[in-house]
Image: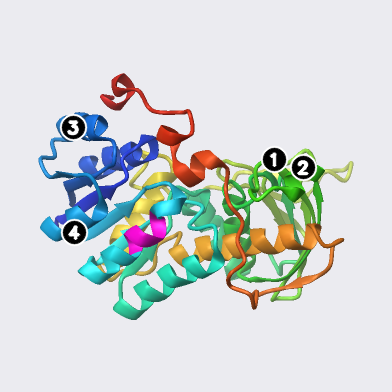
Amino acid sequence: MSDTKYRVAIIGCGRMGQNYAEAYTTYPDTEIVAIADANAERREVLGTRFNVAALYPDVETLLANNVPDIAVVVTPTKYMKDAVLACTEAGVKGISTEKPIAARLEDADAMVEACTERGVVFAGGNLQRAMNEVQEAAARLHSGEFGDIRGASVHGFGGEISGGGCQHISILRLFTNAEVEEVIAWGSPTEALNAETDEGLIINGRFQLTNGLECSVFGTPTPCRGVDVWTGECLVRWDWNPPEIFKGYDPHGNRIRCEPNYSPYPWSEFNYLTGSIRSFLAAVNGEGQPWITGADLRQALEVAIAAKRSATRNSVPIKLPLEDRSLALYPRPYRWLGGDVTGRPQSIEEATG
């Protein structure tokens, strides 16, 4: 842990923002110095709850009065780009954001590029890629402990491929240490294919990876819901929990589940949000990279856009990176605009904690 006590601002303090605020008030090397939230009544309640006096209606007013070391952007997706760019221009050292990072690919590019140009650490958010067991399983795959990777598959790629689907793509890229370079996809139902958003969209298909692997993609139900990666003898399976490891076969030819023996991790208070935050803070302190980055979220969005584009064009192969950066895929209204304006507002009683 750093001896520095980082000054943190929470920008967008709805339900998820409050999860971040709980974490940042827990750690001894961070202090929340400001909160920005458009809901005035909730803003006052949260100031009391988290003992923060500097409360602002928007990011511009916050930055005009109080430039933090770290900005935690947890606004609805529509407002993330403006908040991130404002923070980079103000001189914030580290910025984290949530999923999906944007609807339009060029907006995601703008955030990644602005942070890179200004030397700002740009982290992603609450994804299972930041679970310490996922990181360790990936490191063991990359070290060759399980042998050479021979194949991969994605299961349950549907419902909202730019939102929850970020989880699958981020872990697939991590486990295989490769990028998706071509997508062929089939989608259903018809109304979801014709919609502007990804809500309810189910994708089946194939991802071609830069390391030569072909990854089968299943949106329709299978016995799994996550990502499988296998070698000649081993299978590593992420299914929304610490990855399972199977090694060898029993006399009936079934895979044998073995004890993964993951190393202990000193932080566990907030599930995989913990790994996201702690690795982000380490990166701001000059120690490695965040376990999930803004660039990771950008890559996941690009794969989702390519998948829907292929599915709406009779499964034509789509090459990545996409040349047309104006392409977009909107998340469901709750993610895009937030609960306050889409019929799922948070009660003041809930905001008090």
Label placed on residue 44: 3
Circle 2 SS class: helix
Q: Which residue is mark 1?
A: 200
Three-letter code, disc 4: Leu
Query: 278 above or below 335?
Result: below
Q: Say whether disc 1 or disc 2 marks the residue closer to the N-terminus.
A: 2
Kind of residue indicated by mark 2: Glu
**Sooner in the amino-acid sequence: mark 1 or mark 3:** 3
State if disc 2 and disc 1 touch (CB < 8 Å): yes
User: Residues in magenta?
Assistant: 80-84
**How far is disc 1 from disc 4 in space, using C-alphas?**
38 Å
* Location of residue 79 in the rendering, given as x and y in whole percent from the top left corner: 40, 53
Q: Which mark is residue 63?
A: 4
Local crowd size for mark 4, using a 10 Å CA cut-off: few (<14), some (14–19), many (≥20):
many
* Residue at 21% over, 41% down: 25
Judged from this view, the residue extending furthest toward the right is 252
Spot occupied by residue 201 in the image (x, y as percentages of width and height): 72, 45
Left or right of 161 in this view: 233: right
Q: Is residue 202 left or right of residue 242?
A: right
Kind of residue indicated by mark 3? Glu
